[in-house]
């Protein structure tokens, strides 16, 4: 008689661990072969993936400091809301990600001059991304292009060779100006957006700004430029707010001065006309005019102080971003992480091979039941 192999059925309530181990041991050669194939694929991917470096700097943004509280309280008593004009505010760090990802910001980064291995003279980042002669060729990217990306490659080859003039319109985050990007600039903008590294830590009050690029010296230059442009954006915003504050305080000061001089003239004219103050009505009117004069003088005096402070604030050049960890040229690659790639492929190979060994008996059992049912149905038909 032919010996039959016991196969676990899908309806089994219990699975014998010993049987599973025996089954895996019998198929150990298959498991080792599949795992080895996956490991070789992992080694190939790890050593053919494009190399990249990441450089970054850590900075602490200046927080808004509310000033002029006495004047604000005084103004609120008079029904005037000074709002944020007296605060000397700066941009909130929560806005920084929107700035560094905006089209105007990235357009400035495109013009960053860098030195790469394939160019003896400095080129811009825009030229690097739009001219393939400056870029390092990758075997893996070539394989992807002619395997997974083959349909797209064929489509591009069949399309008429003409320049795409479609432009993309963006709005400046801070100024509200309309920015137009050409088709090539839009592609570079997307690449820059992908490679910008931005990390915010509200708890500790710092932000980390960096960039990823295939060459270490160039990535340090780009990261430093990211910081320089961001700092200029924040400084311009603060300077604009301080100028607006100066204009507002100066206008309020002129109005308060005019009101003060008017109240002063009214009080002096009344005192000259009523030197004796013989009646109670005259004394009451003098007290009222004197109180109005005192209030007008207090507002005028406070606004005069605030005007001088606003003028000094415009002249001062205070840092808005304090660097605590500057940009340095990276010595180690940030990608590819070869050991992690190989370990991942190794685990995938083990999981795939073991899974197939364990699932295959169930598949064979189901196929066997289907074949038996087909035979029974055919016999019943006959």
Image: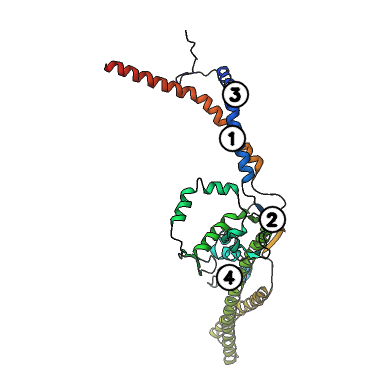
Label whose residue precedes the other's in the sequence (3 or 2):
3
Q: Are marks 1 and 3 in contact (CB under 8 Å)?
A: no
Q: Residue furthest bottom?
A: 273
C-alpha distance separating marks 3 and 2: 45 Å
C-alpha distance separating marks 1 and 4: 64 Å
Question: Which quadrant of the figure has residue 19?
Answer: top right
Q: Which residue is depicted at the point 46% across and 55% down?
A: 157
Crowding at label 3, few (<14), some or many (≥20) Cα neighbours within 10 Å?
some
Residue at label 4? 85
User: Which element is circle 3 on?
Assistant: helix
Crowding at label 4, few (<14), some or many (≥20) Cα neighbours within 10 Å?
many
Q: Do the residues labelled 1 and 4 touch (CB within 8 Å)?
A: no
Label 3 or label 4, whichever lies nearer to me, is: 3
Q: Position of residue 356 (x, y in %)?
A: 52, 27
Residue at label 3? 28
For residue 216, the mark is 2
Label whose residue precedes the other's in the sequence (1 or 3):
3
Instruction: State whether residue 62 appears in this view.
Output: no
Q: In this view, does 372 lie to the left or right of 4?
A: left
Q: Do the residues labelled 1 and 2 touch (CB within 8 Å)?
A: no
User: Which element is circle 4 on?
Assistant: helix
Label whose residue precedes the other's in the sequence (3 or 4):
3
C-alpha distance separating marks 1 and 2: 31 Å
Residue at label 1? 38
C-alpha distance separating marks 4 and 2: 44 Å
Label whose residue precedes the other's in the sequence (1 or 4):
1
Instruction: State whether residue 343 appears in this view.
Output: yes
Q: Which residue is depicted at the point 57% across and 49% down?
A: 141
Q: Position of residue 46 (x, y in %)?
A: 63, 43
C-alpha distance separating marks 1 and 3: 15 Å
Q: Which residue is depicted at the point 53% across and 84% down?
A: 281
């Amino acid at each position: 008689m032919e010996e039959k192999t016991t196969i676990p059925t899908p309806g089994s309530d219990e699975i014998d661990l010993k049987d599973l181990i025996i089954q895996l041991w019998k198929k150990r050669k298959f498991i080792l072969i599949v795992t080895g194939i996956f490991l070789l694929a992992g080694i190939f991917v790890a050593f053919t993936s494009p190399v990249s470096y990441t450089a970054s700097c850590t900075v602490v943004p200046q927080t808004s400091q509310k000033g002029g509280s006495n004047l604000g309280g005084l103004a609120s008593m008079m029904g005037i809301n000074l709002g944020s004009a007296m605060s000397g505010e700066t941009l909130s760090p929560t806005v920084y990600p929107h700035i560094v990802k905006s089209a105007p910001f990235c357009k400035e980064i495109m013009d960053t001059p860098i030195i790469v291995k394939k160019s003896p003279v400095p080129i811009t980042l825009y030229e690097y991304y739009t001219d393939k002669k400056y870029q390092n060729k990758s075997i893996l990217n070539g394989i992807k292009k002619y395997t997974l990306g083959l349909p797209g490659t064929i489509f591009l080859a069949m399309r008429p060779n003409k320049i795409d003039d479609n432009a993309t319109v963006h709005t400046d985050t801070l100024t509200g100006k309309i920015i137009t990007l050409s088709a090539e600039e839009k592609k570079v903008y997307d690449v820059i957006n992908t490679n910008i590294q931005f990390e915010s830590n509200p708890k500790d009050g710092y932000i980390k700004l960096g960039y990823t690029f295939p060459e270490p010296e160039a990535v340090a230059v780009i990261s430093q430029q990211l910081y320089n442009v961001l700092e200029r954006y924040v400084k311009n915003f603060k300077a604009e707010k301080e100028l607006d504050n100066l204009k507002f305080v100066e206008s309020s000061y002129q109005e308060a001065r005019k009101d003060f001089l008017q109240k002063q003239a009214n009080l002096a004219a009344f005192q000259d006309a009523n030197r004796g103050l013989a009646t109670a009505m005259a004394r009451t009117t003098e007290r009222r005019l004197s109180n109005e004069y005192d209030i007008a003088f207090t507002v005028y005096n406070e606004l005069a102080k605030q005007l001088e402070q606003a003028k000094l604030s415009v002249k001062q050049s205070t840092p808005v971003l304090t660097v605590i960890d500057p940009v340095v040229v990276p010595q180690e690659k940030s990608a590819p992480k070869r050991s992690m790639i190989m370990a991942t492929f190794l685990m995938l190979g083990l999981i795939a091979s073991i899974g197939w060994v364990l699932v295959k008996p169930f598949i064979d059992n189901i196929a066997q039941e289907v074949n038996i049912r087909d035979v029974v149905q055919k016999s019943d038909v006959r």
